[in-house]
Image (spheres, rainbow, N blue to C red):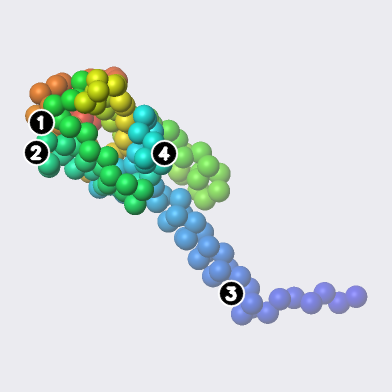
Amino acid sequence: MRRVSARPEAMKRVIALTLLCAFVLESAAFAGLGSDKTAYVGGTENQIKDGAEGVSSAKDEKNFVFESKDGKLAIPYDQVNDMEYGQKAGRRLGLALTISPWLLFSKKRKHFLTVGWKDDQAKQHAAVFELGKSIIRTTLATLEARTGKKIEYQDDEARKSGLGGA
C-alpha cells in the first residue's frame, strides 16, 4: 500500500492558517479592559449590569459619572463617605498553556476603585469599578480633590500605583 503525501502548497496553507489563528487568539486574549475605560464590577446599583464596560469621569463639578450602554450612574461628591483603591495581580496561566510558556513571566494587573455614598434618604450605597491603567492616577486625585476625602489604599503596592510611584 502506497502512502500519499500531502502537497507542499497544502502544507503551507495549513501552517499559514495555524499561525493566523494563533495571532488572532493572542490578540483577543490580551484584549481586556481598555486603558482609558472603566467597568462596573458590582454594587448596590441595579440599573447597571455587573461587568458593564463604559467610561467614567470626575470632570463634572458635582458628580462622579459612569456611563455605559446599560445606563448612567452619577455619584454626588458631597455624599461620598468612603473610597478605597486596590489591585489584583495574576499570572496569565491560561494564555501560557494555550499560546506561549513565556507568558508565565508576565502579570496582568487589575485596578479597582470602591466608592461608598449615602443618597438623599440616608441609604448607604456602594459601587466597585475596574479602572483602565491610564486613568487611575487622575481619577483618584480628582476624586480626593472634589470629595475632600482621602482614598484608602489596600496595601503599599496599591499606594505606589495610585500615587504615581511615590
Amino acid of disc 1: Arg
For the residues bearing labels 3 and 1, Cβ distance under 8 angstroms = no
> Which one is closest to the eye, mark 4 or mark 3?
4
Q: Position of residue 86 (x, y in %)?
A: 30, 26
Mark with earlier residue (4, 2): 4
The numbered disc on residue 13 is: 3
Query: Left or right of 108: which side holds 64?
Result: left
Q: Secondary structure at mark 2?
A: loop
For the residues bearing labels 4 and 1, Cβ distance under 8 angstroms = no
Quickly name the residue at label 2.
61
User: Eyeballing the image, is 77 above or below 95?
Assistant: above
Mark with earlier residue (2, 1): 2
Mark with earlier residue (4, 1): 4
For the residues bearing labels 2 and 1, Cβ distance under 8 angstroms = yes
**Residue at 38% from the left image edge and 44% from the top image edge:** 52
Quickly name the residue at label 4.
50
> Quadrant location of residue 2?
bottom right
Mark with earlier residue (3, 1): 3
Q: Give the residue furthest to the right.
A: 1
